[in-house]
Image: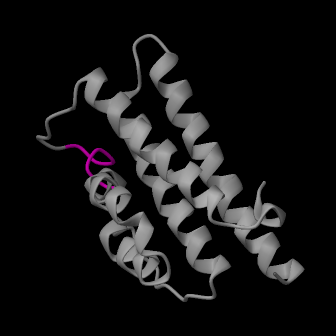
Amino acid sequence: MQPDKAAAVRGWLSKAANDLRGARIDLDVDPPLIEDALFHCQQAAEKSLKAFLTGHDRPFKKTHDLDELGRACLEVDASLDDRMRSVATLTVFAWEFRYPGDTQVPSMNEVRDYLAIAESLYTAILARLPHTCHP
């Protein structure tokens, strides 16, 4: 992989790793910042998918839609299929809690499950990219 492309992939993955870290920190404070943690989970998944697409020279539009990004990733690697079904559920957290409204906040157990989904995707994407792309 060309050094400039590897650097771009590393940039996406570094941002994804920071979002995962942010989600963990949000859940460790008392009281936990659940809405913020969910936003970081969605962002980590989005950036992981964009890293994968960048690494495979697949263009993508500006979007927070993890289903759309996931479909593009599946065109490259169908073995990601099982993960994409669960990852798509994170899409709504890009905006769900960013503004006031009548939304149901998930339980801590549910949030930890969502974090596990984002972490699992990040790990799967790392495993499918050359080590020169790893942050």
Q: Is residue 9 magenta?
A: no
Q: Image point 11% across, 40% down: which residue?
A: 102
Locate the N terminus and report the quarter of the image it occupies.
bottom right
Q: Image point 33% across, 58% down: which residue?
A: 82
Residue 18: image location, x then y, percent: 64, 44
Looking at the image, which residue sits at the far front? 79
Q: Residue 79 lies in what quarter of the image?
A: bottom left
11 over 8 or under it: above or below: above
Tell which of 47 and 132 is nearer to you. 132
Tell which of 98 and 128 is nearer to you. 128
Specify the segment rendered in magenta.
95-100
Residue 81: image location, x then y, percent: 35, 66
Q: Image point 81% across, 71% down: which residue?
A: 7
Residue 71: image location, x then y, percent: 35, 77
62 over 65 or under it: above or below: below
In the rendered structure, the answer to whether residue 76 lies left or right of residue 11 reads left
20 over 88 or under it: above or below: above
